[in-house]
Amino acid sequence: MTCCSLLSRAARSEARLFPDVGRGRRNSISTTYEIATAGDNPRPSLCKISKEVPRSCSPFVPFLLYCYHMQNVSIRQAQETEYALVTAFYSSVGEVVVPAKDEIILIANINQKIVGAIRLCREEGILVRRTLNVLPEHQKQGIGSRLFLAMDAIIGGETCYHLPYAHLQKYYESLGLRTISPSELPPHVHERFLTYSKSFSVIAMRSN
């Protein structure tokens, strides 16, 4: 995908991926997009994008860098032979994960290195989305959102539960989840919620 087409797609989804950007500034997108894709070069360099964006568009510099950065990120399902790499990735961000053979794991790769991952587990017939993580140096660049939405496409219209940290509530709501009462969780997920709550502030969420 070219930088231009990626910018176009990302501009259409900016409100969803960047909910913290003020509504009053979104009118700057078209100007910023024209600047970023101006000239004969259909794939302007990172330097060119950042230098040519005027000060009035400065809130969108991170947005443009996200568009360029996404060219180098591949999202795909991990193969079973890669589960050891997935386990090592999670270990690097402080999570202890031993993938099961029947779960689906999506990974984000940059230069053949795992920089993000998310898991989908079917537990007692119930779908549970688990452990969305991105390496700290690659956070706030849209990778987590891409992983989440890619997993959405796999889930389809089926109900899926999620137990994220409470401080991420607005982020996950912006991606389509809704907050529910813990009492609405399936019994085994509710049990996990109670266990997590002893150490962390978590909330119960679901899709569909």
Image (cartoon, rainbow, N blue to C red):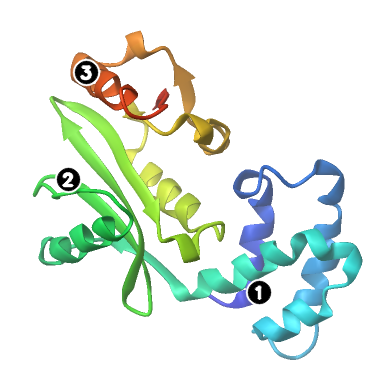
Q: Which residue is mark 1?
A: 4
Judged from the image, the secondary structure of the residue bearing numbered disc 3 is helix
Percent position (x, y) of residue 112? Answer: 31, 77
| Type of the residue with mark 2 | Glu
Q: Which residue is mark 3?
A: 191
At horizontal 66% and vertical 74% (from top left) the residue drawn is 4
Camera-side residue of 200 and 179: 200
Write down the quadrant of residue 165 in the picture. Answer: top left
Q: Residues within 10 Å of mark 1 (few under 14, many from 20)?
A: many
Q: CA distance from mark 2 to mark 3?
A: 20 Å
Q: Which numbered marker is on residue 103? A: 2
Side of 53 where 92 appears, left or right:
left
Q: CA distance from mark 1 to mark 3?
A: 47 Å
**Residue 122 visible in the shown view:** yes
Asked if 123 appears above or below 106 in the picture, the reply is: above
At horizontal 36% and vertical 37% (from top left) the residue drawn is 156
Of mark 1 and mark 3, the one earlier in the sequence is 1
